[in-house]
Image: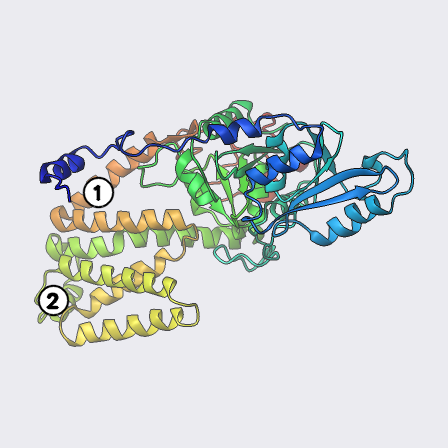
Amino acid sequence: MKKIPIKNYIDKFKNPKLDPEQYPEKSASEEIEIKSQEIDKNLHTNITTLKKIYSIPENNDVKIHNFTIGGLHTKAALLFISTTTDVDMISDHILEPLLKNEDPEKEIGNLIEVQSFTTAQQIKDIVNGANQGNTILLVDGEEKGLIIGTSNFQSRSVEKAENEVVIKGPKEAFNEKVSTNISLIRKRIRSENLIVEQVSISKRSHNELYILYIKDLTNDKLVKNIKERVSALDIDAIQNLSLLEQYIEERPKSIFPSVLYTERPDRATSFLEDGYIVLLMNNSPASLILPATFWSFIHNPEDHYLRYIYGNFIRILRVCALFITLFASAIYVSITNFHSEMVPTDLLLAISATREKVPFPSLIEILMMEIAFELIREAGLRVPSPIGPTIGIVGALILGQAAVQANVVSPIVVIVVALSGLCSFTLSDVSMNFAIRIIRFVIILSAGLFGIYGMTAFFTVGMFYMVSLKLFGVPYLSPMSPKYLSSKDTIIRQLLKSERIRPGYLKPKDVIKKAEE
């Protein structure tokens, strides 16, 4: 056996780039050349080519059915993938009319009983059509094939939204079938100006992306920017929107999310009507809305479904909860370590009495309980749903009570961490929720090192950073900073009849909501 010197392994780790000679890529030029061919007049030649492309008979769910068209006495063949097509429709509305035909002068297009079909002249077109669940009809002596719409991909029915729950509002949510999702949006926007563009975004899997926007509202430069980003992708497969988001976002290393992910068609519709762009894909029970601002992640669909006073009440409550989540634990650490003079004497004595037997400084106490809370939250999400709430409640109670009785942490720390964690649940957006949770730990460390001054310095730097962010050409904190013409829907929303201005930072073609004049 030939011995390989250890130096070769060390060099391999120092230079992680793959050597093309060591890992040669298997060329697909032959298959590409076959697909670029025109459809032959000879039916047997076409069938042989398709059998080679689809590896028939090894590929079990790809079917080729040979038959003779009645009346025309012409040989023909149907190609379809049985797991993605409506087999009953093929039998009843395509095959049966062709076999029972007795008129020798009737055209094939007039025989089949389907809603839509298109013609194709290249092999790659009919292959792509079959991969999308359509049925391919090839006729002997014809240099073209028919792509017949018979797709029937399996999916869930329209159900309730799981992550964006509302009490007073529509209950429908997107599912994994893009045609259903587009239908849910078109049910709400019945306009000829709603554009649905289809773009292929992967080379091997041929995943389709659908770009939705309203033609007479959305800024053309914004649409062009998104299309350029999508067309620049050079990847083998992107199976869903969660992966696509990471490819098209402008600042992938930023802690703040730049694309809004929503599973509610009513929310996606409201953004479309303001001039935003919505992205949809198969296999994704949600949509991407861009460009998103900071306020998009803070708002909730129910803010507008409730009356003016009620909606603003829960929105102010949510903003207060955001600040409690960020600063509650950090303020406790700052006061106990650096600024005890800020606390009334009675409260300071009460805190000191509870911490008398605790062997750890307050920073370590807070960090231990915060990490434990995050672990309980993550465990509750990952276990089966019947067990999740039990772990969350029982685990937190037992862990907190045991930690206090063992004098590992003081009771007031449990209260502070529980309040901070509870307030973090008011943010429904998953991405922003993660950002706030991570920032909370950094603020706690800043408070532990420098007290109130450290918290203030970090918060100021964070605000500078947020003001500097510009995603898809839109400032992150707009319309508050910089100030744009808008309905001022930031922390406090206006009366519905007063919201007559679309967001100016999107530069829409029609700024005034004329329907509300």
Report which quarter residue 15 is drawn in: top left
Q: How crowded is mark 1: few (under 14 residues within 10 Å), some or many (20 or more)?
A: some
Residue 6, above or below 402: above
Q: Which residue is drawn at 42% across and 30% down?
A: 27
Describe residue 348's horizontal placement relative to residue 153 as left or right: left
* Disc 2: which residue: 352
Indicate the secondary structure of the residue bearing disc 2.
Answer: helix
- The number of numbered discs placed on residues in the rendered structure image is 2
Residue 17 position in % (x across, y down): 24, 32
Describe residue 15's horizontal placement relative to residue 429 as left or right: left
Q: Which residue is drawn at 36% across and 32% down?
A: 25
Q: Are marks 1 and 2 in contact (CB under 8 Å)?
A: no
* Disc 1: which residue: 456
* Residue occupying the far front of the picture: 1
Task: Out of 478 and 38, give the one closest to the viewer.
Answer: 38
Q: Which residue is drawn at 47% across and 56% down?
A: 163
Q: How far apart are marks 1 and 2 (CA)?
A: 25 Å
Indicate the secondary structure of the residue bearing disc 1.
Answer: helix
Dot 1 amino acid type = Thr
Q: Is residue 364 visible?
A: yes
Residue 284 position in % (x across, y down): 51, 48
Residue 145, above or below 174: above
Report which quarter residue 42 is drawn in: top right
Residue 126, above or below 62: above
Please report whichever mark, 1 or 2, sits nearer to the chain's N-terminal start. 2
